[in-house]
Image: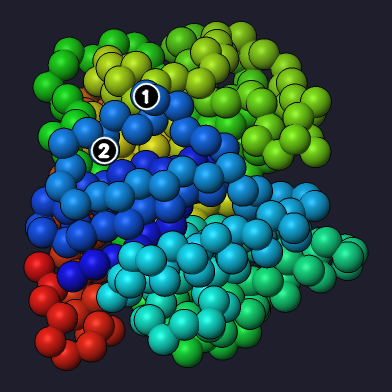
Amino acid sequence: MHVLVTADTVGGVWTYTQELVTGLSQRGVRITLVSFGEIPTPEQCTWLDGLRDVDYRATGFRLEWMQDCEDDLRMSATYLQQVIAEARPDLLHLSQYCYGSLECRIPKVVVGHSDVISWWATVHGERPAESGWIASYRKTVTTGLAGADVVVTPSRWMLTQLQEHYGSLRQGTVIYNGRNPGLFNPHVSKEDLVISVGRAWDKAKNVALLTQAPHTTPVWVAGEERHPDPAFRDFREHPDRGQGVRFIGRQSEGQLRQLLSRASMYAATSQYEPFGLAPVEAALSRCAVIANDIPTFRELWGETACYFRQNDGEDLARKIRELRADTELRQTYANLAYRRAQQRFTAERMVKEYLDLYRNMVPAGVAVA
């Protein structure tokens, strides 16, 4: 079987793509991978080394949620059509809505990782004001979703958001994202350290909550501070640095894994989160997960996370103090989150569910791993 996969290199979609493509390749699926957004660094591409039958094509076309992207979307769609005509895949696995509207007879899976309107509605409490850009974006997403044979989301919450903001779907299903547990070390002695991961400029990640109250436990926040859209390149979110909070900037995957192995707690501060790979990575590192009480985290983590009142920085600081003071309770939450991640959020389970989906979509006679 031959699958064409699209990705972007800006955030968690690239990590998701790494796990998906690696798992598919190891199961004998041939992959044509096309990325959009920024050209990835050599370090971002090391995971491709040694994979069989993966043809990777990096592009710098702007993404559909970026300002003034219309020309790039047209050119990238033309480019993608050319790649499809050349590669002749059996199925398209698309991580951008816009390519769901490509005219072709090949089955299309469109993955709804997130979207601007549900982001805005969650962060600001209301839908964005109408503008030319919002109208264009809504049309792009609606058309792309309508062109998909199957729409996949990483949570039930995200599926309901797409239906609420863009209308009914031909077929929608949920496949939780996953990570390879072997990449993370849950057996290191833990330190009194809280880690959080989130882009400082992204209000959805809400890392500023950690600065609303002082902390006696060191809190380190890892994440990019430069906005990926050049239209906002001069913008930086500068939350007040609360006592005990250290912003350490963007970390490599290796650096972040090392930090998570040392940390005893992870603060999942997002107020908008269609899934959240970082809490999974923390759980696989046996960190106790302290989570914002939002629907997605309740769906994913159930009673295995310690929740603080929604968007309440004071309560978040209180939960950190409570877990630091009660070692047994902290270890209980760490073990609960670890077992939950091992059971529900592994890359192996994710890849298997995608392969099951592909089997139901490709024409008879196409061999599926």
Q: For the residue labelled by badge 2, is the local secondary structure a helix, a strand or a loop?
A: helix
Question: What x and y, as percent, mark residue 230?
Answer: 75, 35
The spot of residue 37 in percent (x, y) is 57, 44
Q: In the displayed structure, would residue 328 be above or below residue 182?
A: above
For the image shown, how many numbered marks are present on the structure? 2
Disc number placed over residue 43 in the picture, else none:
1
- Asked whether 86 or 254 is in front, the reply is 86
In this view, the residue in front, 280 or 25, is 25
Location of mark 2 (residue): 48
Which residue is rendered at x = 41% and y = 47% of the image?
A: 57
Q: Secondary structure at mark 1?
A: helix
The answer to whether one can see residue 333 in this image is: no
- Residue type, label 1: Glu
**Residue 63 point in image, percent of width and height:** 63, 52
Task: Name the N-terminal-most of marks 1 and 2.
Answer: 1
Q: CA distance from mark 1 to mark 2?
A: 10 Å
The residue sitting at 33% across, 72% down in the picture is 88
